[in-house]
Image (spheres, rainbow, N blue to C red):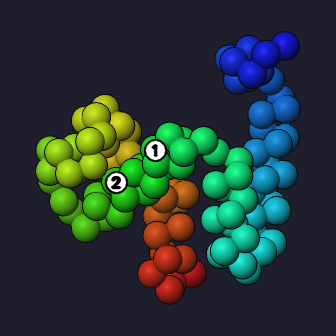
Amino acid sequence: MGYNRFMKNNDPRVNENLAELAFALSRTNDAGLVESFLRCLLTPAETADIAARWALVKALERKVPQREIARDLGISLCKITRGSRELKKPNSGFQRLLAVMNGQK
């Protein structure tokens, strides 16, 4: 079973491995270790994509207009709309992580 098949079939291993990674990352207080791990795990293109998506979330939080975000980050309006929808969900992961970043809990 190849990687794409693994992801397409919603194999339970996806949830299992994602939960395991989340647990491991939550256990470290070493931002340098997490960054190093992410750079080892992801290709340069995936790293840039994730960084752009996080920049998108922060821009949405600052109420930057979506078209400006698209122009500045080179992100499609579809991704921005999805990010905006996720950010608006009650108790969303985006809101919770932004609160952590802003020193709230």
Which residue is denoted by mark 1 in the rendering? Answer: 49
Disc 2 to disc 1: CB gap under 8 Å: no
Rendered image quadrant of residue 61 = bottom left
Three-letter residue code for mark 2: Leu
| Separation (CA) of disc 2 from disc 1 | 10 Å
Q: How many marks?
A: 2
Decide if residue 15 is in sight here.
Answer: yes
Q: Is residue 60 left or right of residue 94?
A: left
Q: Is residue 54 above or below residue 96?
A: above
Three-letter residue code for mark 1: Asp
The spot of residue 75 in percent (x, y) is 30, 40
The spot of residue 58 in percent (x, y) is 35, 63
**Residue nearest the observer in this picture, 7 or 34:** 34
> Mark 2 or mark 1: which comes first in sequence?
1
Residue at x 53%, y 67% (from the top left corner): 96
Is disc 1 placed on a helix, strand or loop? helix
Is disc 2 placed on a helix, strand or loop? helix
Label 2: few (<14), some (14–19) or many (≥20) C-alpha neighbours in 10 Å? many
Label 1: few (<14), some (14–19) or many (≥20) C-alpha neighbours in 10 Å? some
Rendered image quadrant of residue 28 = bottom right
Q: Is residue 6 above or below residue 68?
A: above
The spot of residue 86 in percent (x, y) is 43, 47
Residue at x 75%, y 22% (from the top left corner): 3
**Residue nearest the observer in this picture, 85 or 40:** 40
**Residue nearest the observer in this picture, 22 or 49:** 49
Question: In the drawing, what numbered circle is on residue 56?
Answer: 2
Quarter holding the C terminus? bottom right
The spot of residue 23 in percent (x, y) is 80, 60
Q: Is residue 56 left or right of residue 64?
A: right
Which one is in front in this view, the residue at disc 2 or the one at disc 1? 1
Residue at x 25%, y 35% (from the top left corner): 77
Quarter holding the N terminus? top right
